[in-house]
Image (cartoon, grey):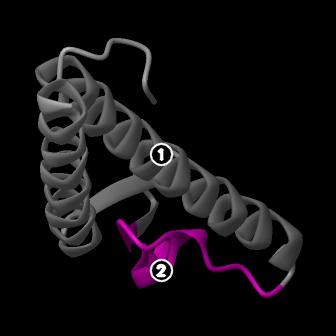
Amino acid sequence: MKDMSKMLKQLQQAQSRMMEIQEELNARSMEGSAGGGMVKVIANGRHEVLSIQIEPSVVDAEDIEMLEDLVTAAVNDAMSRVDKMISSEMQKMSGSLGMPGLM
C-alpha cells in the first residue's frame, strides 16, 4: 500500500511539473525564416504567430506568389522549431522522472 501511495504522489508531482513546463514553453518564442532571412516569423509555444518581418526587397507586386511562399515557409519553419523545443523539453522531463520514453 505504501508503494501505491508513493507512486500516486510521484505522479501528482510529475503532473504538476508538466503543467509548469507547459506554461514555460508557452511563454517561449522561436524564430523561423525563409529566403535567407528575408522573411522572419516569431511564434510562441502555443503555436501562435507573434510577428512577421518582411524585407522590403522581397515585396514585388508582380510576384505575390513568391512572397506568399516565403511567408508560408517561414511560418512552417517557426512551427517546426516550436515543436522541436517542446519535444526536447518533454524528453528531458520524462528522463528526470526516471521514465524514459514517457513522451
Q: Which residue lies at the image location 17% right of the left edge and 25% below the top edge? A: 3
The residue beneath circle 1 is: 83
The residue beneath circle 2 is: 48
The answer, for residue 34, to whether it is visible in the render is no
Where on the picture, by quarter, is residue 43? bottom left
* Residue 8 spot, x, y in % from top left: 24, 44
> Is 6 on the left or on the right of 80, as rendered?
left
- 43 shown above or below 11: below
Give, as a single range, the part of the protein colored magenta. 42-61
* Residue 7 spot, x, y in % from top left: 21, 33
Q: Which residue lies at the image location 17% right of the left edge and 41% below the top edge? A: 5
User: Pointer 1: residues within 10 angstroms few (<14), some, or many (20+)?
Assistant: some
Give the Cα distance between marks 1 and 2: 12 Å
Q: Which residue lies at the image location 79% right of the left edge and 87% below the top edge? A: 61
* Residue 34 spot, x, y in % from top left: 54, 50
Q: Amino acid at mark 1?
A: Asp
User: Pointer 2: residues within 10 angstroms few (<14), some, or many (20+)?
Assistant: some
> Which quarter shows the N terminus?
top left
Name the N-terminal-most of marks 1 and 2: 2
Which type of secondary structure does the marked residue at label 1 adopt? helix
Q: Which residue lies at the image location 25% right of the left edge and 33% below the top edge? A: 4
> Which quarter shows the C terminus?
top left
Question: Does the magenta portion include 28?
Answer: no
| Nearer-the-camera pick, 79 or 70 | 79
- 3 shown above or below 36: above
| Nearer-the-camera pick, 101 or 12 | 12
Q: Check the image and name the residue furthest to the front.
A: 1
* Residue 89 spot, x, y in % from top left: 24, 37
Q: Amino acid at mark 2?
A: Glu
State the mark number for residue 25. Answer: none
> Is 74 on the left or on the right of 103, as rendered?
right
Question: Does the magenta portion include 55?
Answer: yes
